[in-house]
Amino acid sequence: MLTNMSTGHPGAPETTSAPRSRRTHDDSPDTACLFTRLSQLGEGPERHAVRDELVEAWLPMAHRIAGRFRDRGESIEDLRQVAALGLVKAVDRFDPAVGSFESYAVPTITGEVKRHFRDRMWAVRVPRRVQDLRNQVRLARRELMQRPGSPEPTPAALASHTGLTEKEVKAGMEALESFSALSLDAELTADGGGASLADTLSVADPSYDKVVDREAVKRGLRRLPERERAILYMRFFQDMTQSSIADRLGLSQMHVSRLISTSCASVRNDALADSGPPT
């Protein structure tokens, strides 16, 4: 761009001022012409070829961004794959008329990698709101401890710094420990001869299932006629045979069998129906 630097005197020299380069890294190629061409092409082999050329040209930048997240529990190869996916999305969505590709692609790729950590890397799944609290607490803790010799900030200090409540800060601090989990085979003592974490877990008690089943059938049993309730009581609680029940009630054994079948089906259907809490 030519800039007239004359001072008003005849013969004053004209100097040129070179524009500043926008490139800040060696992995930022000049692909403006390719993006313009891509925007003018319809679907087809030629468009796919140009798209692939752009992705390949900018792939080193995507790998550089992935490298920022190394040593966080994920392999660098997996991170590069995620960053490459973000690069593909950036190439597909970029409009060359609105600015430089690098300015658009960097936040797009970075966001893709962060989403990978947020959605895939939690050993203990926590709600999105708690994940956000975790990030706020982590950043606040780092800011408060930047000065050498600074003590570990208290929940009250973190709450004051972030504007959160102490309850929210404590939830965020708990989430800091949820990114990874101990194996159930982890030993509780350091001597190597103690019990494992799995040994502290309770086992299923079948008695609880019986309680649940009894509560589930109460409503259905109340709805049965008195005779049917009496038949089920004699059959399942007094352990009487169908013949004995038939003799006591003056019915045929076949009739008793049908009544038991229909009554059980009615109680089962009522227990499985989602019609509100038992009365």
Image (tube, helix red, strand yellow):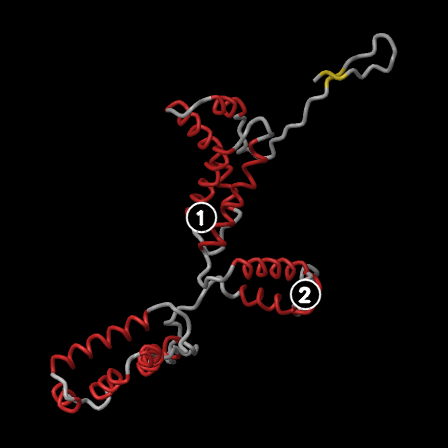
Percent across and percent down for residue 232 are 23, 84
Amino acid found under the numbered disc labelled 2: Ala
Percent across and percent down for residue 231 are 22, 85
Query: Callout 2 environment at 10 Å: few (<14), some (14 to 19), or many (20+)?
Result: many
Give the residue at x 51% y 25%: 35
Which sits in the foreground, 90 or 268? Answer: 268
Query: Which label is found at residue 159?
Result: 2
Which sits in the foreground, 30 or 266? Answer: 266
* Residue 187 falls in image quadrant: bottom left
The secondary structure type at the circle numbered 1 is helix
Which sits in the foreground, 37 or 154? Answer: 37
Which sits in the foreground, 261 or 146? Answer: 261
* Residue 248 falls in image quadrant: bottom left
Name above or below for residue 13 compared with residue 146.
above
Q: CA distance from mark 1 to mark 2?
A: 35 Å
Side of 66 where 160 appears, left or right: right
Percent across and percent down for residue 273 are 34, 68
Amino acid found under the numbered disc labelled 1: Ile
To which residue does mark 1 refer?
Answer: 76
Query: Callout 1 environment at 10 Å: few (<14), some (14 to 19), or many (20+)?
Result: some
Name above or below for residue 81 compared with residue 131.
above
The residue most toward the top is 10
